[in-house]
Structures are given as structure tokens and as C-alpha cells.
Image: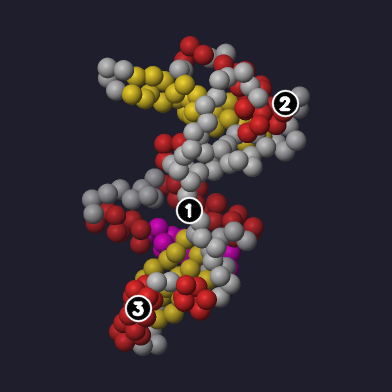
């Protein structure tokens, strides 16, 4: 792990390069590569974290620190930096011989404002499938099901715990540890969910059947 910090004269954090040193290749031929954390997971919005307006000062300092440890790496790979990033031009201005490559970018879709418009934009097969699921839900449980958007901060921790429980039960039955096996990960999501809710970012949808939570969408 390479976390390179930049601090001002008051020791206030103004820049962070969240990097990692990895070994690439095979037993016969390999090299050490410095890359942004998350590169191996095909994330599409990676970057240095720099206080706005400080990019032209901080980026050269971070690169200077990296190059001072040249004996520890062979390749720098800063993948998935967004084209609109204010850091990009300062990285490209450095004397390092950069090579630009086209990489995978997560697809996006513009969602209509209302459900009916979205539903009619689906394929005929998808619409048929959705109607079948809805009929089965209503047939099996009549008025005993409902869904809601959880936006009450006092409910958040309990609903998140229920979502984590459902997730862990599924994966543990398959012999896998699940994404929430580490208590630190659970703590992180609890902290993030409250902050994301306050910012208006969080969407936590809950489906309840006969009073019990059957599914939760956390996004």
C-alpha cells in the first residue's frame, strides 16, 4: 500500500495519492507496478484526491515523491481517471513518457422521470416478465406485501442490518464469506449510509411480505 500525503504549512491534508504496488506478470517474467487503488477491479472513476485549486502545485510534488522511489517500481499505471479531472492535465504535463490507452467504462442509462415511461421502454420480453412477477406476488400474498423508500435516519441502521443479514445468509449458504464478513466493513457502511442519506445520495428500497423484510435494494 502506498498512501502518499501532501500537507500545507499548517499540516492540513491538501492532497492524497491512494496507490498500491503490485506484482504483474508470471514467475518467469514479472514487474512491479504502481497503480491507483481499485484499478484491478475495473472501477471507472479513479483519481488523486487534491484540494480544488491546488492541482498544479500538488500533482508535481506527488509525482516527484513517486519518482524518488524509482528503484521500487517499473511501471506507473493511472487508469480510469475521468477526462474531466482537473488532475489529468498536470499528470500529462510531467516528463514521464505516458501512453494513453482506451479502457473499459461502465455503461450508463438515462432513467425517465416516471415508472410508466421506463416500463414501456423495456423490451417486450422484459415487460412480460415483470408483469408475471407482479401477478405472482399479488396472487400469493394479496394485500400482504408492500415496498417503501427508507429515508428516516432513525430507521437506517436497523434496515441496513437487515439488508446485511439477508446478504450474509445467501452467501454463507453457498459456502462463501459474503461481503459483510468483516465487522469493519459493516461499520463503514453504517457510517457512509447516514452521511449519504443526509446528502440526498442514498436510495434504500425495502420489500416487505407479511410484515417481514424480503428484499432490500441498497444504492
* Precedes in sequence: disc 2 or disc 1: 2
- Which residue is drawn at the image coordinates 44% and 79% (left, top)? 146
Q: Secondary structure at mark 2?
A: helix
Q: How is the image coloured?
A: secondary structure
Q: Secondary structure at mark 1?
A: loop
- Which residue is drawn at the image coordinates 51% and 56% (left, top)? 108
Q: Any magenta on residue 142?
A: no
Bounds of the magenta segment: 152-165
Q: For residue 104, which quarter of the picture? A: top left
Query: Could you say which disc has been placed on residue 57 in the image?
Result: 2
Image x and y of residue 25, in percent: 33, 24
Would you name the residue on which mark 3 appears? 128
- As measured in the structure, the alpha-carbon distance from the residue carrying label 3 to the one carrying label 2 is 57 Å
Q: Looking at the magenta stretch, what is its main secondary structure?
A: helix
Query: Could you say which disc has been placed on residue 143 in the image?
Result: none
Query: Which residue is farthest top?
Result: 71
Query: Could you say which disc has been placed on residue 107 in the image?
Result: 1
- As measured in the structure, the alpha-carbon distance from the residue carrying label 3 to the one carrying label 1 is 25 Å
- Tell me if I can see residue 154 in this picture: no
- Which residue is drawn at the image coordinates 42% and 66% (left, top)? 216
Amino acid at each position: 500500500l502506498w498512501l502518499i500525503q501532501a500537507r500545507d504549512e499548517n499540516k492540513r491534508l491538501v492532497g492524497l495519492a491512494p496507490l498500491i504496488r503490485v506484482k504483474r506478470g508470471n514467475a518467469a517474467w514479472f514487474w512491479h507496478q504502481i497503480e491507483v487503488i481499485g484499478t484491478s477491479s475495473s472501477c471507472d472513476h479513479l483519481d488523486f484526491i487534491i484540494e480544488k485549486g491546488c492541482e498544479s502545485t500538488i500533482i508535481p510534488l506527488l509525482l516527484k515523491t513517486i519518482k524518488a522511489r524509482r528503484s521500487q517500481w517499473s511501471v506507473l499505471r493511472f487508469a480510469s481517471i475521468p477526462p474531466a479531472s482537473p488532475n489529468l492535465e498536470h499528470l500529462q504535463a510531467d516528463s514521464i513518457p505516458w501512453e494513453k490507452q482506451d479502457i473499459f467504462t461502465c455503461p450508463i442509462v438515462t432513467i425517465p422521470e416516471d415508472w410508466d415511461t421506463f416500463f414501456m421502454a423495456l423490451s417486450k420480453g422484459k415487460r412480460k416478465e415483470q408483469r408475471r412477477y407482479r401477478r405472482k406476488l399479488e396472487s400469493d400474498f394479496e394485500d400482504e406485501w408492500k415496498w417503501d423508500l427508507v429515508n428516516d435516519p432513525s430507521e437506517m441502521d436497523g434496515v441496513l442490518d437487515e439488508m446485511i443479514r439477508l446478504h450474509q445468509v445467501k452467501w454463507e449458504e453457498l459456502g462463501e464469506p459474503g461481503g459483510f464478513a468483516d465487522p469493519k466493513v459493516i461499520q463503514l457502511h453504517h457510517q457512509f449510509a447516514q452521511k449519504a442519506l443526509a446528502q440526498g445520495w442514498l436510495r434504500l428500497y425495502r420489500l416487505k411480505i407479511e410484515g417481514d423484510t424480503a428484499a432490500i435494494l441498497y444504492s
